[in-house]
Amino acid sequence: MDSALVIHRLHFAFTITYHYLFPQLTMGLAPLIVIFKSLALWKADERYNRAARFWAKIFAINFLFGVITGIPMEFQFGTNWARFSHYAGGVIATGLAMEGVFAFFLESSFLGLFLFGEKRFGQRVHWLASFMLFAGSWISGFFIIVTDAWMQHPVGYEIAADGTAHLNSFWSLLFNEWALWQYLHNMGGAVITGSFAMAATGAYYLLSRKQEEFGRLFLRVGVIVAAIAATVQLFPTGDRHGKLVTDYQPVTLAAMEGLFQTESGAAIVLVGQPDTAHEKLDNPIYVPKALSFLTHRHWEAQVKGLNEFPRDQWPDNIPLLYYSYHIMVGLGTIFILVMVTAALMLWRKKLFNAQWMLWIIMLSFPFPYIANTAGWITAEVGRQPWLVYGLMKTQEGFSSNVSAGNGLFTLLGFMGMYTVLSILFIILIWREIGHGPADLSRDTSKAEAARSVQAA
Amino acid sequence: METLWFILVALMLTAYVVLDGFDLGAGIISLFVARNHDERRLVLRAIGPVWDGNEVWLIASAGALFFAFPLLYASSFSGFYLPLMIVLWLLMLRGVGVELRSHVSDPLWWSFFDFVFSISSLLLAIFFGAAIGNVIRGVPLNSDGYFFEALWTNFRVGTNPGILDWYTVLTGVLALVTLTVHGAHYIALKTEGNLNMRARRVALLSWFALVLLTVLSLIATLYVRPQVTDNFRLRPWGWIIPLIVLASLVSMRFFLRKGSDLAAFLSSTTYIVGMLAGAAFAIYPYLLSATTNPSYSLTIYNAKTGAYSLSVGLVWWAFGLALAIGYFTFLYSSFRGKVLLDDEGSY
């Protein structure tokens, strides 16, 4: 029975983590594509349209992979977490069903128009299609966050006679305080992924001396957006999200920070190793009193340590939680340093010739993916041992009618399938970046003709 | 209220089968009717701008089902665990098959993705048909509302059936033929010349199989689950549904022989709507009936969510669906007409 629990947790964790590699880029790129389309209309400059078309290609590949890896998510609540679905469906299914009707229809309809309708319907409709894609992807994110926020901080529900949770306030569910800050923090993370990818592509073009005009454009837009997004990610959204954890999940906060004993004027640990057996943090490097200030806005405030809570309330994997959280925050801080420096160099007109900085930007693109993933691990492992905070334990929620063996079989199936998908994805993205925006500016009908000839 | 949501969920699922049904049908027949690179591109162009939106109806239906009947969602999705996972993998392959073919200019690459697209569409049609068969036949529910079905047991219907038995294989093959006809009508509607002619021929030939399988499956259903006639006795207006199915079978052949592709396509649409409406009408108010003990069955009454959710849901659902229908109208009218190779589009 226990191993079934582990398998079902891994099943969901693996498929959702893999899935979220794609939406974070599409949600991050969508507003950037709108920026290019707007610039093209406003300045009547065809270069911006080429840039938009190039990123639309990258977007489309990511969108496809996001869709095909996302469909399993809509099903896995039922397949692997049936008892949870029965218990919480009365509340969370509202969020999931609304995502379907409000976001997925919007995105999928306008994607076709955006990809195939530029010539046929003209620039204004094409701008509208890009905007609708942006709206659709961001609405989709909102409803998913609403669902997760309810699991983190349940509101607007009552427990019905049959013991399941029923919604009793639609607006409290939608405007859950937790959802608001989690949403802003999450979307900030997506914009960071998108803008880093754009800046890194620009740096690649400059360093490899191809398509340099577009390289500079991508760097300019990517660096400016990334510098703003990375800063906002720390303050206010990260800070406010942290406050919510402090208020509603104090035991999670203590575990994230590796604070085993309650302290007044608690220090914030930059690096250290949690030792759960001896309930202490080994080899810490810390900033005195900073944790008290960050969480309570007071240098001497008391911060509750894990010792205040019974052990069965502790998150069940404190090292994973601790390291994920520290990786997220550490990377987030480095992002600000890198991109604010790059933005200053851009302003002083030194960026495009600074080889060392271009190398840093080019190699930086995987790290937002790591930071976003680590952030989600922090949120979800931090919620443990609860599936719905304070209401349902994780061990009560999985599908007990699906055996560990069947779960393992499909988990391995997904791993195999996703390995194949990853290979295809890398081949395709590599080709698109190799072609670059200038290549796409070729007359399409000529390209088509060439292809038909080849085929014949 | 729960009856209304039963109808709404059934409507969304029907919309899925009608819309994605022709994408799947196009996939099933593409290897036979489209014989060279350009023809295969035309098939992909016919469904290219719409297949993803069509597939969303499945996700939205799953969402609506989860929303209105959480216990049904929990029970059936975990009980049908293995076939659902296979369906998910097939849906991935279908998406990859449609979208990735055009990215690389290489005949081997093309052939590979043509095959992936076609075989995944074919298997999906069979699995969806078998799923409907399982719902009509019933599943071995426990007293707590859960079950787990193996992929097959002894291929007999009974108290311990598998996902596949002779009855669900029959409904699976019926679905395959239905979507073949439906997809052929769609391809005929969207194309000209050889492709159009071959698609019509496929539709005309499969029609005989469709009629035969429709009759067989009706007889088999009466044998497997005799209770399906109860609702027809209780609400005699329901007899209009089999009449509609019959009329649509006649009209699809009539219009196709006349060369009216649109009317033939609308006839197969009517056929699908009629068959699914008939199934929904026959099982109501049961959602999933138990082969073990009738009192364990899931009905719209014991599987529904809270009354408050259902009424609030009606407001946002109506609003959201109105928007969705707006987008679809816009999308389909934007890409109406025959598909050509010199159009914009990357397939």
Image (cartoon, coloured by chain):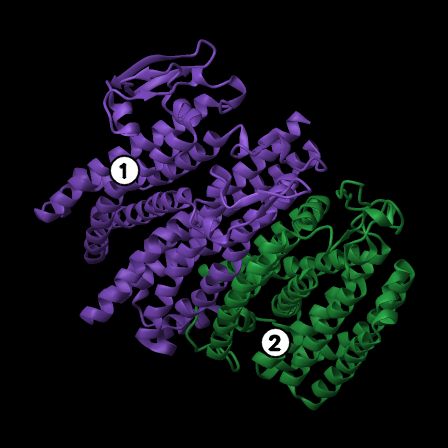
Chain colours: A purple, B green
* A292 with respect to B64 (left or right): left
Expressed as whole percent of the image width and height from the top left, the position of residue A235 reads: 25, 39
Residue holding disc 1: A234
* B165 with respect to A175 (left or right): right
Q: Which mark is residue B187?
A: 2
Quadrant of residue A107 in the image?
Answer: bottom left
Can I make out residue A313 in this image? Answer: yes
Mark 2: few, some, or many residues within 10 Å (few <14, many ≥20)? many
- How many numbered marks, from 0 up? 2
Look at the picture and state if A191 lies above or below B4: above
Expressed as whole percent of the image width and height from the top left, the position of residue B106 reads: 48, 60
Farthest residue in the bottom direction?
Answer: B258
- For the residues carrying marks 2 and 1, which lies nearer the camera in this image? 1
Q: Nearer the viewer, residue B322 or B128?
A: B322
Q: Nearer the viewer, residue A146 or A356?
A: A146
Estimate the spatial distance between the alpha carbons at disc 2 and disc 1, rounded to whole Å.
53 Å
